[in-house]
C-alpha cells in the first residue's frame, strides 16, 4: 500500500509543520508510549502533547524507542495553566524539555490565555515564550485558545506574531472569525477536537458524503479540515482508527461537499470545550 504523503505548512517564522499529526490528550500516561509508537509506525511524524496532559515523558520515550531521529518527528507541547508567571514558565519549560528528554521542542504554546487570572497578563507570559524561541529551545512559539482580542494585545504589545493558534474547530463549531484573523495575520490555525470527539460522525450530512466518496465519516471530516488549510491531530488509542485517520490524501471533497459541511456550524451552541474568555482551571 502506498503511504499517504502528509503536506507541510510553512509557519510565519519559516519553520515547517506536518499538516496532520497525532494528539495525545486524555491518553493515560501508561498507554501513551504504546499509542505514540503505533502512530509513528503508521507514519505520523507530528505529536501534540502538553504539560497538563501528564504524558510528555512517555511521548519522549516512544520517539526514542521508534529509532527515528529526533528531527524526523515534530513535537509540540504547551505551558500549563499553573505557570503563567515568567519565572514559573521558565521552570516549567525546563521540566518539559527534561520530561521529553529533548534539547528543544518544535513548537511550544501558551495552552490557555486565562484572561481572568494573573491580572490578565498573558503578555508577560508571551514575552517569556519569546526568550525560549530566542535561545533556540523552542524552534517555534505559538498560542492556544486565544480569541481575537488576545491576539490583538500580543500584536500591539510584543514583537513576535504567534506561529500558530490552536483552537477548537469542527463542523459544529467552525470558529470562523478567529480563523480569519489568523489567516489575515499569518497565524496558522490548528484545529483541536477536529472530529468533535466523535460527536459529528453520525451527522447525516457527513454520512451521506462519506457513503458517496467511499470513505468513513472521520476521514471526510478530517479531509474537510485539510482542504480548509488547518493543521489537525486527531486522537485515538485504537490502531485501526489511527490508520483510518492517516489515510486522507487519496481523495478530495468538492466545493459543494465542503460548503455543506461548513454549513453544519452551530455558532457558540456548537462549542464543546470551555470558553477561552472564562476558562480558569489551574491544576493543583
Ligand atoms: N489546546 C487545547 O486546549 C486542546 C483541547 C482539546 C484537544 N486538543 C488537542 O487536539 C487533539 C484532538 O482532540 P480530542 O482528543 O479532543 O478529540 P478528537 O481527536 O476530535 O476525537 C477523539 C475521540 O474520537 C475517537 N475517534 C478517533 N478517531 C476515530 C474514528 N476514526 N472513528 C470514530 N471515532 C474516532 C477517539 O476514540 P478512541 O481513542 O477510543 O479510538 C476519541 O474518543 C488532542 O489529542 C490534543 O492534542 C487541544
Image: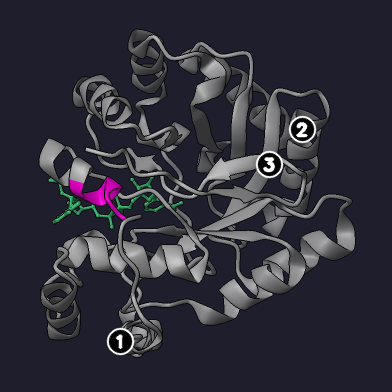
Part of the protein shown in magenta: 244-248
Q: Which of the 4 quarters of the picture holds residue 256?
A: bottom left
Looking at the image, residue 132 sits to the left or right of residue 235; the answer is right
* Magenta highlight on residue 137: no
Q: Which mark is residue 264?
A: 1
Mark 3 and mark 2: Cα distance apart in space = 7 Å
- For the stretch drawn in magenta, what is the main secondary structure? helix
Q: Which mark is residue 133?
A: 2
Residue 238 visible, this angle: no
Mark 2 surroundings: few (<14), some (14-19) or many (≥20) residues within 10 A: some
Label 3: element kind? strand
Q: Which of the 4 quarters of the picture holds residue 32?
A: top left
Q: Are marks 3 and 2 in contact (CB under 8 Å)?
A: yes
Instruction: Choose the circle earlier in sequence order: 2 or 1.
Output: 2
* Magenta highlight on residue 245: yes
Q: Is residue 61 above or below residue 261?
A: above
- Disc 3 designates what residue? 141
Q: Position of residue 188 (x, y in %)?
A: 62, 59
The quadrant in which the N terminus is found is top left
Q: Is residue 160 above or below residue 239?
A: below
Looking at the image, residue 237 sits to the left or right of residue 187; the answer is left
Mark 3 and mark 1: Cα distance apart in space = 32 Å
Amino acid at each position: 500500500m502506498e503511504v499517504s504523503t502528509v503536506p507541510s505548512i510553512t509557519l510565519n517564522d519559516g519553520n515547517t509543520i506536518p499538516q496532520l499529526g497525532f494528539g495525545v490528550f486524555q491518553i493515560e500516561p501508561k498507554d501513551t508510549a504504546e499509542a505514540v509508537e503505533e502512530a509513528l509506525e503508521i507514519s505520523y511524524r507530528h505529536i501534540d502533547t502538553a504539560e497538563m496532559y501528564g504524558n510528555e515523558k512517555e511521548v519522549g520515550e516512544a520517539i526514542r524507542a521508534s529509532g527515528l531521529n529526533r528531527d524526523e518527528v515534530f513535537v509540540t507541547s504547551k505551558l500549563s495553566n499553573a505557570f503563567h508567571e515568567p519565572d514559573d514558565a521558565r521552570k516549567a519549560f525546563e521540566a518539559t524539555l527534561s520530561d521529553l528528554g529533548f534539547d528543544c521542542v518544535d513548537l511550544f504554546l501558551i495552552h490557555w490565555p486565562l484572561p481572568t487570572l494573573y491580572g490578565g497578563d498573558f503578555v508577560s507570559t508571551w514575552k517569556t515564550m519569546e526568550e525560549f524561541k530566542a535561545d533556540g529551545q523552542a524552534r517555534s512559539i505559538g498560542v492556544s485558545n486565544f480569541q481575537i482580542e488576545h491576539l490583538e494585545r500580543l500584536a500591539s504589545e510584543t514583537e513576535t506574531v504567534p506561529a500558530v493558534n490552536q483552537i477548537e474547530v469542527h463542523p459544529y463549531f467552525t470558529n470562523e472569525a478567529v480563523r480569519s484573523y489568523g489567516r489575515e495575520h499569518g497565524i496558522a490555525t490548528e484545529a483541536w477536537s477536529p472530529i468533535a470527539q466523535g460527536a459529528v460522525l453520525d451527522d447525516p450530512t457527513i454520512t451521506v458524503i462519506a457513503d458517496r466518496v467511499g470513505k468513513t465519516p472521520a476521514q471526510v471530516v478530517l479531509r474537510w479540515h485539510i482542504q480548509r488549510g488547518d493543521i489537525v491531530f486527531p486522537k485515538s488509542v485504537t490502531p485501526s482508527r489511527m490508520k483510518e485517520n492517516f489515510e486522507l490524501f487519496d481523495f478530495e471533497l468538492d466545493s459543494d461537499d465542503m460548503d455543506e459541511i461548513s454549513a453544519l456550524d452551530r455558532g457558540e451552541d456548537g462549542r464543546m470545550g470551555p470558553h477561552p474568555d472564562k476558562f480558569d482551571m489551574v491544576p493543583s
